């Protein structure tokens, strides 16, 4: 079957021209990806290839963002440069979302914490442990990745956690880590670690305000559940 190239399409149907003359909001996800990759393969146009890539992740851009360069290169017509372009564009989108969420400067609920941290660790395939350092008005002084680990656990050095707290003169902290499995309930080690962090903070007069377990779309708050 002969491939119909984008150049032979009506002017209004070409993604680049459509963006220029009609605006970016009228382009489909497949058309936006087609602009990124520029060309398809011998059998399909860039838009056709883009549709096939999207179909593989059920047209879910969040799932597409999880694909690695190597996984994208499994599609015929996607070489390393094109795969990197897709990964880069989706990462920019993620960072833009994070910049918006990061504008929250004062913590008033566990939902505020989730909105700040979820863009950073919500869709990772490994665990990471983060801390928010707060002043006495619950304003965020800094956020910091303390450690990252494997699929099921990450090591946490409580001494390093509180060393940074003292440097910032923080009076409170909120700790967060993600569960790549999507499971929200805390493990026994999560509960024990929370207790250890809380007790160490009491000695330094730095309050542990909450511990959140983060997944892609939800969270578990130790404080909200009354087990802190």
Image (tube, grey):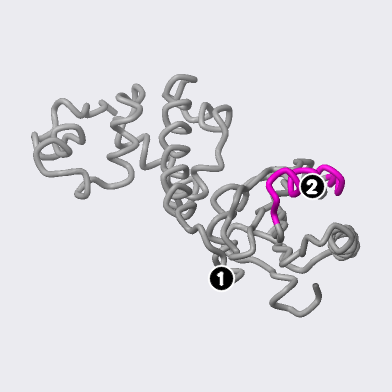
Label 1, on which residue? 108
What kind of secondary structure does the magenta stretch mostly adopt? helix
Label 2, on which residue? 161
The magenta segment: 155-170
Q: Quadrant of residue 173?
A: bottom right
Looking at the image, residue 81 sits to the left or right of residue 115; the answer is left
27 lies above or below 170 = above
Measured as percent of width and height from the top left, residue 54 is found at 42, 45
Looking at the image, residue 61 sits to the left or right of residue 51; the answer is right
Looking at the image, residue 75 sits to the left or right of residue 1; the answer is right
Element at label 2: helix
Looking at the image, residue 185 sits to the left or right of residue 33; the answer is right
Q: Quadrant of residue 18?
A: top left
The quadrant of the picture occupied by the N terminus is top left
Question: Measuring 74% from the left and 43% from the top, which residue is drawn there?
Answer: 146
Residue toward you, 109 or 92: 109
Dot 2, crowdedness within 10 Å: few (<14), some or many (≥20)? many
22 lies above or below 39 = below
Measured as percent of width and height from the top left, residue 216 is found at 59, 57
The quadrant of the picture occupied by the C terminus is bottom right
Whether residues under marks 1 and 2 lie with C-beta atoms below 8 angstroms apart, the answer is no
Measured as percent of width and height from the top left, residue 120 is found at 58, 47
Which mark identifies residue 192?
none
Measured as percent of width and height from the top left, residue 126 is found at 72, 44
């Amino acid at each position: 079957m002969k491939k119909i190239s984008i150049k032979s399409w009506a002017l209004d149907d070409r993604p680049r021209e459509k963006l220029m003359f009609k605006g970016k909001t009228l382009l489909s996800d497949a058309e936006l990806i087609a602009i990124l990759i520029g060309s398809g393969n011998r059998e399909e146009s860039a838009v056709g290839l883009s549709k096939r890539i999207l179909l593989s992740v059920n047209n879910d851009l969040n799932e597409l963002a999880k694909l690695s360069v190597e996984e994208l290169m499994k599609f015929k017509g996607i070489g390393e440069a094109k795969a990197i372009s897709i990964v880069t564009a989706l990462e920019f989108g993620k960072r833009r979302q994070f910049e918006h969420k990061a504008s929250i400067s004062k913590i008033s609920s566990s939902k505020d914490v989730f909105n700040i941290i979820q863009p950073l660790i919500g869709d990772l395939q490994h665990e990471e442990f983060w801390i928010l350092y707060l002043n006495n008005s619950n304003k965020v002084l800094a956020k910091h990745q303390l450690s990252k680990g494997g699929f099921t656990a990450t090591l946490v050095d409580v001494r390093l956690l509180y060393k940074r707290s003292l440097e910032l003169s923080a009076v409170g902290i909120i700790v967060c880590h993600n569960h790549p499995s999507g499971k929200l309930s805390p493990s026994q080690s999560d509960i024990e670690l929370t207790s250890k962090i809380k007790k160490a903070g009491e000695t330094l007069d730095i309050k542990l305000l909450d511990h959140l377990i983060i997944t892609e779309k939800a969270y578990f708050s130790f404080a909200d559940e009354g087990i802190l």
